[in-house]
Each structure stands twice: as structure tokens, then as C-alpha cells.
Image: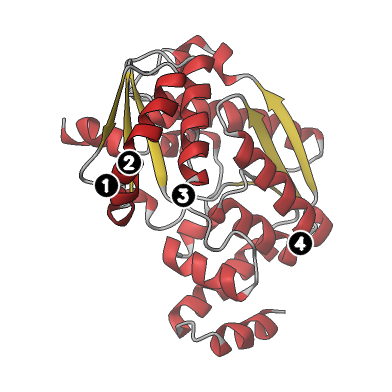
Amino acid sequence: MSDEYSERFRAAGIAAETIAKWQRLLARLASFPSVLVAYSGGVDSTFLAYAATLALHEKCLVIRVATDIESQQQANFAERWAAQLGLNYRAIPFHMLEREDFAQNPPDRCYTCKRTILSLLQQVGREQHIQVFLEGQNADDAGDYRPGRKAVLETGTLSPLAEVGLTKDEIRQLARALELPVWNLPSSPCLATRVPYGERITAGKLHAIEAGEDYLQQLGLTQVRVRHHGDTARLEVQPADMAEIVRRRAEVFAYFRSLGFTYVTLDLRGYSQGSLNERITQA
């Protein structure tokens, strides 16, 4: 199996070092008797779930905790990819906003979410006699403020992509060669990441954020964020897309006013992943 895919990767021009990481990943996954993969439908978790399924077949259980803080678009993608790739997949609903320690939106909000999800998955997995739990952090994730890593360590969950040193770019390269539909999917963490720390997360805020981002994508913009600053929507788009926002400013302003915002601003720096983490990392 490893040689078959390695030949495909070489034909795609993927570096030998990256192929070696893939081989180590498959060997690592095949060493487990069975696994449960935490799945979101994003690039990393989909790639990991696919690799684990190649290595372990029906002994790989893939579960998505379907929360009230993810977008409907992301949920639809996750369901579609799981069916298309033939994953042994289940979804478990959970209302994250009912957790007060999450809804208050402290700086360790992601720790609370990750710990909750991983603990739930471990409970489900052990009912299926599974003892090995995997999640999709990659080798690049150490560069951002990610309190969720603490939950990964506390629960004994493994991060095999990071273990073998696979970066986000390498994962995308491999996913493209494997013809995984997520290979070029833009990064899209949960909607709660658009609300500044310390400001309460509510269903209404998340609805406005989701509707705003859906609208911007319908305009043809691919990488977008709507940051919710009370009565102000701060729009982050790629620098090349700013002219389109300005050209259609009246229409854009009217739409965001309809979502309940008084002011609509365009961040001149452009899209920046984790921009609301900057005050934390600079502290």
C-alpha cells in the first residue's frame, strides 16, 4: 500500500522528505489495534481520517461532534466528505453554548471546547473498546496561540500528523495527489473564533457572523472573516479582494446593517488567521 501511494506522490512532484513522512504516518497508524479519529471536515482531520482508514479499514472510527458553534456550510462539507471517502463515520450533537465556561469567552475558551469534545469522544470510543484517540494538529500549529493543545495532552490524545512532522502545505500536497476534495479548502475554525475574548458568545452573534461570511463568499471572495466587535463588523478579506468590497460598499454596508451591525469596517491589513489572538500572544 505504501509503495503504491509513494509512486503516485513522486509522479506528482512531491518531495522525497514529504513522502517519507507519509510512510511514517501510515506505519504509525497501522501499529494501533483500532483508533477513533476526531473529525471536523477540515483539511487536517479529513486527511488523517482517510490515512487511518487506509491503514486500519473498519478498525478506524471517525466521529464529528456536531456543535452549535460550527457553520452549516462546514457541517455540510463534513457530511459530504465522509460519505464520499467511505469513512466509518458518525456525528454526535452537542450544545457548546450551554457551557457557561465556554460562552463567557475567556482566553482559554478553546481549551474548554477541545477538552469537552475529546472527553466525549473518549467516552464513546471506550464503549466500542477503542483505546487510541487521534486528532489532526499538524507541525505548523505550534506557531499560533492554541490552548486546545493542553486538552490534547491531558486526555492522552495523539496527534500523528504533528508527530511525523507534516506541515499544512505538505498535507495539502499529499491530499491533492490523493484526490481528496478538501486539499484546497480554506482554513475555517469555528465561528466563536470571530468574537473577541471577554465578549460573551451568543447564538445571535454566531448567526450574524455566519450570514455575513456566507454573503461575502457569494460575492466571489474565498478567504474571509467577519470579526464581531459589538455593533461593528470588521471584515477581513484577501488584499486582492479589497477593491471589490469598496466597489460594492453600499451593497455590503446595507447587508451588514440588515444583520444588526451599526458600523462596517474593512481591515486594511487583510485576512489574518488568528488575528484576535494577537493581544494574548503579545501579553
Q: Is residue 196 above or below residue 20?
A: above
- Structural distance between the alpha carbons of marks 2 and 3: 14 Å
Instruction: Specify whether residue 167 is in view.
Output: no
Residue 56's disc is 4
Residue at the spot of label 2: 236
Query: Which type of secondary structure does the marked residue at label 2 adopt?
Result: strand
Q: Which residue is mark 3?
A: 187
Q: Given the current orientation, which residue lies at the most extreme left position?
A: 283
* Mark drawn on residue 270: 1
Badge 2 crowding class, 10 Å Cα cut-off, few under 14, some 14 to 19, many 20 or more, is many
Tell me what residue is drawn at x 40 percent, y 26 percent: 254
Foreground of the two, 127 or 222:
222
> What is the distance, in whole Å, between disc 1 and disc 2 at their CAs?
5 Å
Q: Residue at x 78, y 46 (%)?
A: 89
Amino acid bearing label 2: Glu
Q: What is the distance, in whole Å, between disc 3 and disc 4 at their CAs? A: 27 Å
Q: Position of residue 155 (x, y in %)?
A: 54, 35
Q: Which element type, helix, strand or loop, lies under badge 3? A: loop
The amino acid type of the residue labelled 4 equals Leu
Mark 4 or mark 2, which is nearer to you? 2
Assign the C terminus to one quadrant of the image.
top left
